[in-house]
Amino acid sequence: MTVPRPVVVTGGTSGIGLAVARRLVADGRPVVLLGRDRGRADDALEQLVDSGADPATIVAVAGDTTDPDHLARAVDVCAERWGPVAGLVTAAGRLARGSVTDLGVDELRAALEINVVGTWLAVRAVLPTMVEQQHGRIVTIGSVLGSVGAADRAGYAATKGAVAAMTRSIALEVAVDGVTINCVAPGPVRTPMNAEQHGTEADRAAEVAFTSSIPAGRWGSPDDVGHAVAGLLAPEAGWTTGSTVFVDGGYTAR
């Protein structure tokens, strides 16, 4: 009998989270999508089914990814449908763009709440089940900006650096329990979240210049990240933990 090994994906209704879900259901793994907006969640379900996913392998839960009760509900839904949660991907995220003097404190706090606190809470929501099962695969979503600098991105970089550091420390806590946790750090990826950042002529010119600095010669796609995440979620991937995996077309290898 095949064990379902279901996965909870926060921020799973668009961008990288949706791409992760698409790859997982293609591999036959059940997925719980957690996102803030009910309408977007329904759209995500429709997209996945239209792409060939079995509707019986997907469920969407609308909720705040920084609310422990909503996260607990996602874990409960997973258990009710398919059994104990076996994987978690923390793809919910928020940008914070601006210089140190221009970025508003409220905007920075909002990014910290979603990117850092939300990740912390999601991991905490699944760990008791994973430790009890003596099996679990967790992938946090960081960014290359957690490791390299970029002007006007200090706030966002701080949140993603925190995610990578958190991942390493949690790995040491749970390695003996059969639970792995790794951080996937994407480079420049075209997603709905960052599309609004490239609206002006100056933005487009900067994008062209930036693309030339990527050894692969192109921006990544959410699916590029989804494939990397799926590998780390595999039951066989039990010897890789506490790592940051850069999915960036060679950007950080320069």
Image (spheres, grey):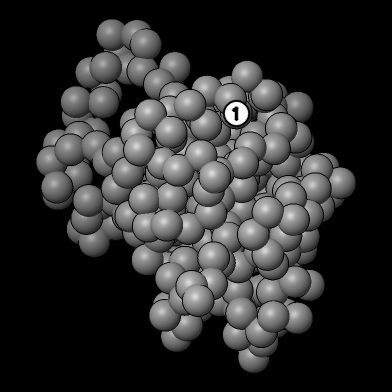
Looking at the picture, tell me which residue is in the foreground, 223 or 149. Answer: 223
Quadrant housing residue 104:
top right
Q: Dot 1, crowdedness within 10 Å: few (<14), some or many (≥20)?
A: many
Please state, as top left, top right, bottom left or bottom right, where the C terminus lies in the image.
bottom left
Q: Is residue 170 visible?
A: yes
The amino acid pointed to by label 1 is: Ala
Looking at the picture, tell me which residue is in the foreground, 123 or 56. Answer: 56
Tell me which residue sits at (30%, 38%) in the image: 221
Residue 201 position in % (x across, y down)? 28, 8
Tell me which residue sits at (61%, 47%) in the image: 32
- Relative to 213, is 222 on the left or the right? right
Looking at the picture, tell me which residue is in the foreground, 65 or 114. Answer: 65
Q: Which residue is mark 1?
A: 41
Is 41 located above or below residue 250 in the figure?
A: above
Residue 12 position in % (x across, y down)? 55, 40
What secondary structure is marked by label 1? helix
Tell me which residue sits at (69%, 74%) in the image: 130
Q: How many marks?
A: 1
- Relative to 161, is 169 on the left or the right? right
